[in-house]
Amino acid sequence: MSRLQVELPGLSLKNPIMPASGCFGFGKEFAKLYDLSQLGAIMIKATTVETRLGNPTPRVAETPSGMLNAIGLQNPGLKKVVDEELTWLEQFDVPIIANVAGTLLEDYVEVAKAISLSPNVKALELNISCPNVKLGGITFGTDPIIAKELTAAVKAVSSVPVYVKLSPNVTDIVSIAKAVEEGGADGITMINTLIGMRLDTKTGKPVIANGTGGLSGPAVKPVAIRMVYEVSKHVSIPIIGMGGVSEVEDVIDFLSAGASAVAVGTANFVDPFICPKLIEELPAKLDELRIEHISELIGRSHRV
Amino acid sequence: MIKQELMEVVDQRKLARNIFEMTLSGKLVDEMGQPGQFVHIRVAGGNEPLLRRPISISSVDKEKGQFTVIYRAEGKGTITLSSRKPGEHVDVLGPLGNGFPVKTDDTQKVFLIGGGIGVPPLYELSKQLIDVGMKPIHILGFQSEDVVFYEEKFKELGETFIVTVDGTTGDKGFVTHVIDRLPKDIGSYYACGPMPMLKAVSEQLEGIEGYLSFEERMGCGIGACFACVCKTNQEQDGREYVKICSDGPVFKAGVVEL
């Protein structure tokens, strides 16, 4: 077995590196730059039942070592994603993790049921943490009871394992993590963005049309590491960690904190070749740390 | 093909108040062709600033393997870029986007209309149009005399009108004032500048084939992040929205809702 190979529910990953949802579209733009089959997996852009046009612009704003975004789950809708985007992605030898979003519980169920039947979708990622839509999204991810209920409902109809993407915008992320585990989640992905705001110094008004946006990038990494560390102590399902990963050292840190694989978000916007670069750099880093197999790093921070 | 390269700064000079011209050299130049494309530049290493800066290509010298950008240093990123010196390297991603079509027609006459920092890509466009036998007329608008650049360079290429909002040089007013008094016996027009200018120009020249280059706050520059979307006039286009970075930045007049 390759020293980078990672086995997770539904996912046989060549390596633990995958682009995070919302930062990679449906892969088309990046396929012009490199072979997507190199990736451990691909987390595709959130899919809702209906076509969504997203929020007004400006949708992004740069912040110290990070950025805010409020795209608003723009996507072509379930039918087009299944018929066009996922079908197109079949040419690559890479498992797809389909990010599922909605306004009502029924929406999540409808998308999950249909999208999990696509042959290359090997797992779902329930988006109960998008901070940029008025309804749904984060409202499901901030109450343990609702999060558990939604997880169970989706789990009941999904043909593939279900991962739940957690929001950091909560008082106690461990309680949400435990709730989704009880609801039957096969894994957790974390963290989504932190709600933030940037003001225009001249006008005093928010820079982003939506007012608030989700903060991502290197600035959020310490928060993400802390949360992965805490959650991994209290759940037994695997975690795909993310939040500010841009260097190979960040990958090591997330695994050490307790994640079993790592997603790369904002860094794809800064350097579109970042995922293959990280994959290429990992073996040398393992040598440097005198680690034979990458899985030896998982949860190192907890060991006595 | 889109490539990423650490390119060498060959020249960096100030052209006008806050306006800089930078020439870079490297293999990426081989990929450049169509005028109106842009590059996405990481102005410094590390995380500050985090995102790249999209800047249009103002001219390409394939023989020397160099290209030039003209940009306004007004935010942290572009101010940092303006401090990069010859011999230093900057991380460039490009060429990106779809530029202006270089077309010929029997009238041979085209308007090239630029506003402020929208002027630079028209320079390469003008050169390429001339190469195929066209006679571009340049109508260039600026805020005031102290931010005017490339006046002589455009004059070397053809008829050129300068207009400033405050009248400190050239005509006083907007590009539309100049267009008003020119005969409209042109085959097509090309425009790059702020949204109000594009709107005014496309209304004024309605019925004539036009190509507009847009500006929008960008994230990735390659079409993946959905930051720079614009609504389209659906009856004419069919698409519900377009991405400025990868579907544009140049669109046929009428496609993008203004």
Image (tube, coloured by chain):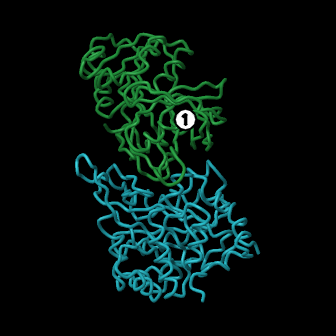
Q: Amino acid at mark 1?
A: Lys
| Circle 1 residue | B85
Of the 4 image quadrants, the one containing the N terminus of chain B is top right
Horizontal relation, residue B27 to residue A105: left or right = right
State the cyan chain: A
Q: Where A80 sits versus B122, above or below?
A: below
| Relative image position of residue B36 (x, y in whole percent) | 49, 30
Q: Give the residue displayed 50% in from the left and 27% down from the top.
A: B58
State the green chain: B
Secondary structure at numbered mark 1: loop
Q: Give the residue displayed 61% in from the left and 24% down from the top.
A: B61
| Relative image position of residue B34 (x, y in whole percent) | 55, 29
Residue B107 visible to the viewer: no
| Relative image position of residue B172 (x, y in whole percent) | 24, 17
Q: Where A237 sits versus B6, above or below?
A: below
| Relative image position of residue A81 (x, y in whole percent) | 49, 60
